[in-house]
Amino acid sequence: MKRCPTCNRTFEEDWLAFCTQDGTTLVVESSAKSSEPPPTIVAPPPPPPGGWQQPSGGIGSGQFPSQPVPPPVPPSNIAPSGGFGSGVPQPVGWQPPPPPPYAQGAKQGLAVASMCCGIFTITFGWCCSVGLISGIAALVMGIYQLVQIKNDPNQNGGKPFAITGIVTASAYFVLWVVIMIFYGFAIFMGSLNH
């Protein structure tokens, strides 16, 4: 049998050389010492049950009257909170702090949609008549979002996106008008030559 000199724990395994608790080198115990029973550990007596009093007239009843012992508080991991009689149990001990309030960003959905429609209009809108519809949508959404930003700048955002949508849609319509004027002028000049 081997014993740890630090924690006095004994081990039956002969192959162990070090204590599994603290890593100290084990000492071989003599057989005479191992026949002794382990030391007895005496625990303190339990407290008297709640409400128990020493009878008067017995030992120690001299000049001091006996005081009632308050009832023991049952162990609990729940403590009341919220004042007297709230009845809402709260866990005792460390609790993580509540998460910070979610900060909502400014609404800018219409501004982004206006920019997307404006970019689509200026790039692919020349292929078909969809450019007229998306250009009008970009102008309307961009102007509406700018009005919303002016009325409530804390709740609405995306001013650069709305301006981009308005500018690209306006550029499309200006170029469209210029092209139509040149086309009409070319047709007019072609009819004069015949």
Image (cartoon, grey):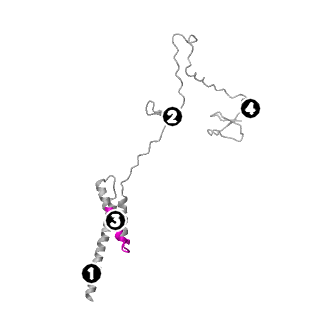
| Among the 4 quarters of the image, the one containing residue 108 | bottom left
- Foreground residue among 27 and 141: 141
Q: Amino acid at mark 4?
A: Ser
The residues tagged by marks 3 and 1 sit, at their Cα atoms, a distance apart of 29 Å
> Dot 1 lies on which element?
helix
Label 3 vs 2, first from the N-terminus: 2
The residues tagged by marks 4 and 1 sit, at their Cα atoms, a distance apart of 122 Å
Label 4 vs 2, first from the N-terminus: 4
Mark 4 sits on what residue?
31
Tag nearer the camera, 2 or 1: 1
Who's the residue at 36% across and 66% down the image?
A: 117
Q: Is residue 57 above or below residue 43?
A: above
Label 2 vs 1, first from the N-terminus: 2
> Dot 2 lies on which element?
strand
Spot the residue most to the bottom: 194
Q: Amino acid at mark 2?
A: Ile
Who's the residue at 28% across and 75% down the image?
A: 178
The residues tagged by marks 2 and 1 sit, at their Cα atoms, a distance apart of 88 Å
The residues tagged by marks 4 and 2 sit, at their Cα atoms, a distance apart of 52 Å
Label 4 vs 3, first from the N-terminus: 4
Mark 2 sits on what residue?
78
- Foreground residue among 37 and 86: 86
| Among the 4 quarters of the image, the one containing residue 54 | top right
The magenta segment is: 123-142
Mark 3 sits on what residue?
138
Q: Is residue 73 above or below residue 182?
A: above
Q: Amino acid at mark 1?
A: Phe
Mark 1 burial class by Cα count in 10 Å: few <14, some 14-19, many 20+: few
Mark 4 burial class by Cα count in 10 Å: few <14, some 14-19, many 20+: few
